[in-house]
Structure formats: C-alpha cells, structure tokens
Image (tube, rainbow, N blue to C red):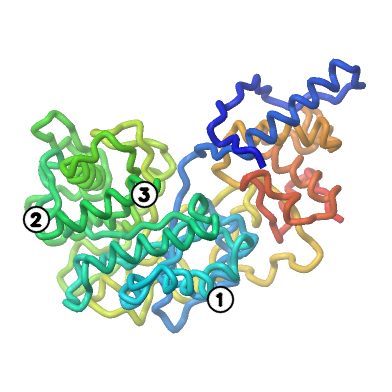
C-alpha cells in the first residue's frame, strides 16, 4: 500500500444536501472516479474530529452493571471514549464493534515487570490486548496511574520510563504504534507549584524522570495525561478559592503575571502543566495535554460542604460542555483539550474517604446520582436510555443498523454521504426535502440514513459500516416518526 499519510488534504466543494443521481456521461464517470479517489484519500488520512467526551470506568464495586450492558448503553450517549484501569477481558470483549475507543492500563504493580525487557512488554501486550483488536478499538495504553506521586516507596521512577519505552517498542514491532499510543497519567502533585500557571515547574526531584517522559511523548506523538481536580483545591481552601472558579463558572478572572486571565481553575491547572513542560525545553514541540481524570463528588465526609449533588451536577455538566467546545486555554487558545470525566459509577468498594466512593454520575444499580445530560440524537439507542432503564428492550440478533458516529468530522460525513447517494447506489430520496427522513435537516442525520442503506445493501459486514471510524453498528432501531431505516 502506498504511504499517503503526508499527502495534502484534498479540497472539496461540500453541498448541504445530496444531489439526485443523473445518467452518467463519460465526463460524469470521470468525476465519479475522482470522487471515489478523493473519498479513499479522505478516509485513509487521519483527520481531526470534533472534540470527544471521555469517561473513566472503574470497577471497584460489587453492585455494578455487567460490562456488556455498560457498553450497550454508552452507545446511546455522547461518550465515545472510555478509560479503564486494567485490561479486564470482559470489558474489552464487551466494547468490540461499538465504535467507542478504549484506553487500557498497566496497573502500578505490573510496571516493574514490563520494564525489564521488551519481550516482557510484548508478552503483556500479546495476552491482554492483541486478542481483542481490531474489533475493540484500543487507542492508548496508560502505564500506571499517578505512579510518580504514590506513597509506595517500592515504585521506581526509572521503571516507569523503561516500561513505556518497552511497550512502545513492542507496538512498533507489531506495526501498531500509530494506532495505539503509550502514555502515563500524572497527578498535579508532580508540580513544584501550580500558581501562577506561567511560572509552574515540575518538582525538583522529578525533573530527570519528567524530562525523559516528556521527551518520549514528543517523539511518539502521545498525549501528556494529567488528573486535575479543582474540587480538592476548593475543599482544602474554601476561604481563598472562589466556588464558581472551581466549578468552571464565569467567575471574576484570576490574572496571571504574564497577562493570561483565567475564569476557571481547570484551565489554570492545564496551563501550569504546559508551563512545566515548556520549562524543560519542549516549548517548540507539539505535545497535546489530555485531562485523564476530572470530576466532583456528590458526597463526602462529615463537614465537607463542597461535595454535594448540586455541585457535582454543575461541575460535570460544565466539564462535558468544555470537552465538546473544541477550545484551548488562555495560554494556548487554539489547542484542543481532550477530557475524561471521573467517573461513570460510584464504586462502593473503593478505599479512602467517603468522596472516593462518590465521584460517579451513576449508582451501582444504574440509577442516576444526579441529572447530567449525556443524550445523543442518532446514537444507537436514540439517546433516550439511561442505565438500568429498559435494558431488555434493545434489539439483538439479526436486527442491526449502521449510523454515523457522533463527533465525526463533517468533511468525512459529507464525502461518505456523496458517495453513498452517488456511486454507492443508495436510493437517497427519503432524505431529500420532500422525504420522510429530511428532518432534522442535519448532516449527521442524513449521513446516518445513507450509511445504513449502504450497509444493508452490502450484507451488513462490519467493514461496510466503517468509513474510517465514522460509522457505528447499532443494535436498536434508529427509526423515528415516519422516517424508517431499512433493514434486512
């Protein structure tokens, strides 16, 4: 296969609606062939999509829904990335063919073994990840969690760096290094101080390790992951930290000496990490920052006035909006920030204080702790299901459909729509202005209809609902009103 990864992105004239197919002259056939070529180029080149929303899925509870049920129901939400804390095989299997990206983890206790040899890393990879791909979309491996700032004196910083390098080498040997990135999530405690953001540096004793890690991330194109919690800063200093500032509200701006104005603490925390990276000499290199954990507990120990359902709802609602906004921070306003909300469930077996067991948006029985809108129109269940609600109602077996994945790049969707309704042979009259599926007049809706029709025509093979990750196999009928989605 020719390497076209560095080819310039083709320029298209994108119409709002598909056009009625016409009889093909030689010139029309030439244009059609060109369109097919451009579609292939577009689908084979990785394109930046709209910012996604991630969630942390912990399993330290004895009353949680099955992974299969979790995977099924997440398809009916705007969540399209899930981060777990191990390589739970039941979870990896459950998320196969869901269109949801997964980040798996090497537990802290296993880092040392993987750090010894590349062969040890490859063995870990071959037994825990390889059996599930590509059906399960694993996009990253998190090596450890807050490894450098735990209280376990047995954890060697050098082992973390070597484990990351060994896993990357194993991925390179298997040709998977472009698909699966290797990184490690840090706590904010890796900083000597976090304010002012423009003057932040890493802790002096961690400088050599952080230099090696940041260099590795820059070389491999992996993101820098940080677990950032404004909640803890407010809880511990309620007299000096404004609650709205911690809750991501539009509080009176906090001014940095270099002129940056921060209206919420999370942006300040992100930029403090950015400054620490720059202080190591990596300011001219592209290193994306991912908020691997952020959330707010709904309940805390006695006397904790910050941990309330209302504050948790406010913070996580704004956090999800922030994740979808495709915006950066005062220091880098054009840089997207990927965010993983912490967490999906309250975990009743988690150690620590009461807050540790109450960061979830859902209880173990599937009921909502508080109401946060995760709905997504044109997802596989229409965005109407909640955990624990009508679980048995989802259609299974032979009834499957193909729809457009939320947050897909508009250029990809338009190219797919033009292909399906043109050379792809799909009858798209239902999504023309007089058709039953014209409303809502949205690209995502029209693309979903066309992709499903193409999928049904070609035998419902999984590769017929791929379109470079913009297609999603659904097990519930996405039909609505008088708009009926075809099925075999």
Which element is circle 1 on? helix
- Judging depth in this view, the residue of 39 and 101 nearest the camera is 39
Residue 162 lies, with reference to residue 25, above or below; the image says below
Q: Which residue is mark 3?
A: 223
Residue 204 disc label: 2
Mark 1 residue crowding within 10 angstroms, few (<14) / some (14–19) / many (20+): few
**Image quarter of the N terminus:** top right
Q: Find the distance from the CA under tag 3 to the CA under tag 2.
A: 22 Å
- The residue drawn where x is 33% and y is 50% is 217
Circles 3, 2 touching at the beta carbon (< 8 Å) = no
- Write down the quadrant of residue 15 in the picture: top right
Q: Is residue 93 left or right of residue 459?
A: left
Instruction: Determine which of the numbered discs, if any, sits on residue 90 in the image.
Output: 1
Which one is in front, 295 or 138?
Answer: 138
Q: Give the mark toward the camera: 3 or 1.
A: 3
Work out whether residue 142 or residue 242 is closer to the camera in this orientation and state it.
142
- Regarding residue 436, the answer to whether it shows in the image is yes
Displayed quadrant of residue 301: bottom left
Mark before the other along the chain sequence, 3 or 2:
2
Choose mark 1 or mark 2, whichever is in front: 2
């Amino acid at each position: 296969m020719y390497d076209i990864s560095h080819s310039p992105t083709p320029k298209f004239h994108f119409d709002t609606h598909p056009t009625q197919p016409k009889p093909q002259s030689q010139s029309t056939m030439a244009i059609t062939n060109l369109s097919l070529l451009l579609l292939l180029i577009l689908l084979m080149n990785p394109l930046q999509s709209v910012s996604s929303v991630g969630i942390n899925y912990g399993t330290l509870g004895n009353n949680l829904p099955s992974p299969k049920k979790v995977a099924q129901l997440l398809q009916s939400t705007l969540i399209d990335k899930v981060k777990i804390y191990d390589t739970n095989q039941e979870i990896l299997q459950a998320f196969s063919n869901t269109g949801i990206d997964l980040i798996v983890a090497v537990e802290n206790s296993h880092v040392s073994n993987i750090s010894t040899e590349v062969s040890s890393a490859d063995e870990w990879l071959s037994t825990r990840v390889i059996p599930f791909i590509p059906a399960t979309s694993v996009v990253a491996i998190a090596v450890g969690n807050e490894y450098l700032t735990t209280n376990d004196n047995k954890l060697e910083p050098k082992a973390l760096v070597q484990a990351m390098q060994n896993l990357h080498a194993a991925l390179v040997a298997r040709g998977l290094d472009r698909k699966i990135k290797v990184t490690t999530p840090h706590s904010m405690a890796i900083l000597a101080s976090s304010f002012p953001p423009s003057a932040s540096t890493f802790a002096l004793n961690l400088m050599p390790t952080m230099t090696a890690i940041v260099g590795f991330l820059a070389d491999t194109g992996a993101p820098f992951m940080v677990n950032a919690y404004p909640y803890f800063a407010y809880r511990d200093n309620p007299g000096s930290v404004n609650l709205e500032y911690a809750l991501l509200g539009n509080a009176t701006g906090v001014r940095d000496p270099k002129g940056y104005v921060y209206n919420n603490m999370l942006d300040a925390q992100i930029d403090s990490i950015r400054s620490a990276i720059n202080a190591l000499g990596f300011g001219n290199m592209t290193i994306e920052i991912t908020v691997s954990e952020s959330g707010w507990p709904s309940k805390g120990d006695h006397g904790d006035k910050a941990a309330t359902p209302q504050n948790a709802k406010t913070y996580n609602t704004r956090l999800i909006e922030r994740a979808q906004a495709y915006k950066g921070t005062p220091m880098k306003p054009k840089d997207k920030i990927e965010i993983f909300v912490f967490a999906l469930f309250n975990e009743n077996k988690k150690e620590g204080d009461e807050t540790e067991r109450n960061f979830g948006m859902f209880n173990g029985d599937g009921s909502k702790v508080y109401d946060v809108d995760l709905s997504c129109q044109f997802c596989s269940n229409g965005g109407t299901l909640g955990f624990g609600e009508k679980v048995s109602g989802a259609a299974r077996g032979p009834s499957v459909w193909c729809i457009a994945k939320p947050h897909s790049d508009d250029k990809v969707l338009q190219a797919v729509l033009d292909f399906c309704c043109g050379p792809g042979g799909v009858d798209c009259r239902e999504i023309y202005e007089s058709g039953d599926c014209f409303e809502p007049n949205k690209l995502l809706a029209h693309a979903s209809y066309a992709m499903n029709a193409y999928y049904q025509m070609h035998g419902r093979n999984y590769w017929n609902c791929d379109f470079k990750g913009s297609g999603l196999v659904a097990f519930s009928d996405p039909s609505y009103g008088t708009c009926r989605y075809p099925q075999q």
